[in-house]
Image (cartoon, rainbow, N blue to C red):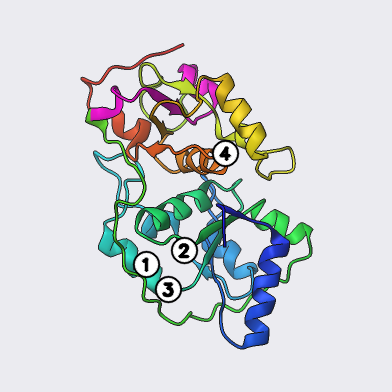
Amino acid sequence: MTGPLISPRELRDLLAASKDDDAASVTVLDVRYRLGGPPGAQEYAAGHVPGAAYVDLDTELAAPPGEGGRHPLPAPADFEAAMRRAGVRADRPVVVYDDWSGHAAARCWWLLRHHGHDDVRVLDGGWSAWLAEEGPVEVDTRRPEPGDFVAAPGRMPVVEADDVLDVPVLVDARAPERYRGETEPVDPVAGHVPGAVNVPTTTNLRADGRFRSAEEIRALYAAAGVSGEEDIAVYCGSGVTAAHDVLALELAGVRAALYPGSWSGWITDPSRPVERG
């Protein structure tokens, strides 16, 4: 597979090939999650892409909250174990989907890429697009065969708190009102990292919930001063949805680093500056 996205039709073809060959040709991960619910595991049990394994964002795609923010990166050994439980293999492509505009799926995509799996794509449009194109639905929650994935972190660029202010182009992926500090429904401090520009994740999607074309994404980011001519890093509230911007930029041919701690990690140190407006 090539590129960070896959269409529902392409995924159906891969699943059909698996059925014809009597051997899995793709690993599908269901990472449905929405801030405030409903619980993804319940949604998964009610119906999912055939053969998909459920992966929990809070417990398997993140470490416990702390100085690293609300969703720190998981320890490599923990992530490796979670991916093996889900059936991820080094020699088999992975497709990830959610029902949260691709935010949780982008986090899983980024983690797998960061830890060394090169063949990972996000289902464009997620669960709703799968249903809209009459993709088959399964309710069987059988345990997948264990995978052999080995986590080798360091493949995707990362920026930590001490270096954030030195990044030439820093992108805040949150909603504009949170960026400006007008409201903060989740974290105890409102505002943004000084010097950051705001490109909300909603910018990446069309009205139907699918990603814009590479040309559209390049133009929209360039309008905010993000051209790819200088080093770029992205952050959000807790490091999850920022991966959505990283994915969109990769679709547009632009490499961007992730600040995993993001805003919730930044504000754990009261000496760090905060900007509003």
Q: Position of residue 229 (x, y in %)?
A: 45, 26
Tag of residue 89: 3
Mark 1 vs 2: CB contact within 8 A: yes
Q: Is residue 191 above or below residue 204?
A: above
The mark lying in front, picked from 4 and 1, is 4
Q: Residues within 10 Å of mark 2 (few under 14, many from 20)?
A: many
- Which residue was labeled with disc 4? 252
Q: Amino acid at mark 3?
A: Arg
Residue 46 colored in magenta in the image: no
The residue closer to the viewer here, 201 or 99, is 201
Q: Residues within 10 Å of mark 4 (few under 14, many from 20)?
A: some
Q: Find the distance from the CA under tag 2 to the CA under tag 4.
A: 28 Å
How far apart in space, not on screen, are marks 4 and 1 (Cα)? 30 Å
Q: Which residue is mark 2?
A: 55
Proximity of marks 4 and 1: CB atoms separated by less than 8 Å: no
* Residue 182 included in the magenta stretch of the image: yes
Name the element at disc 1.
helix
Kind of residue at badge 4: Ala
Mark with earlier residue (3, 4): 3
Q: Earlier in the sequence, mark 1 or mark 3?
A: 1
Circle 2: residue type? Val
Q: Mark 1 Cα within 10 Å, few/some/many (few <14, many 20+)?
A: many
Question: Pointers 1 and 3 in contact (CB under 8 A)?
Answer: no
The residue range painted magenta reads 163-183
- Secondary element under disc 4, as helix, strand or loop, is loop
> Is residue 31 shown to the viewer in this render?
no
Residue occupying the point 40% across, 74% down: 85
| Residue 270 percent location from the top left of the image | 23, 22
Instruction: Report the Cα–Cα distance between label 1 and label 2.
Output: 8 Å
Q: Residues within 10 Å of mark 3 (few under 14, many from 20)?
A: some
Q: CA distance from mark 2 to mark 3?
A: 15 Å
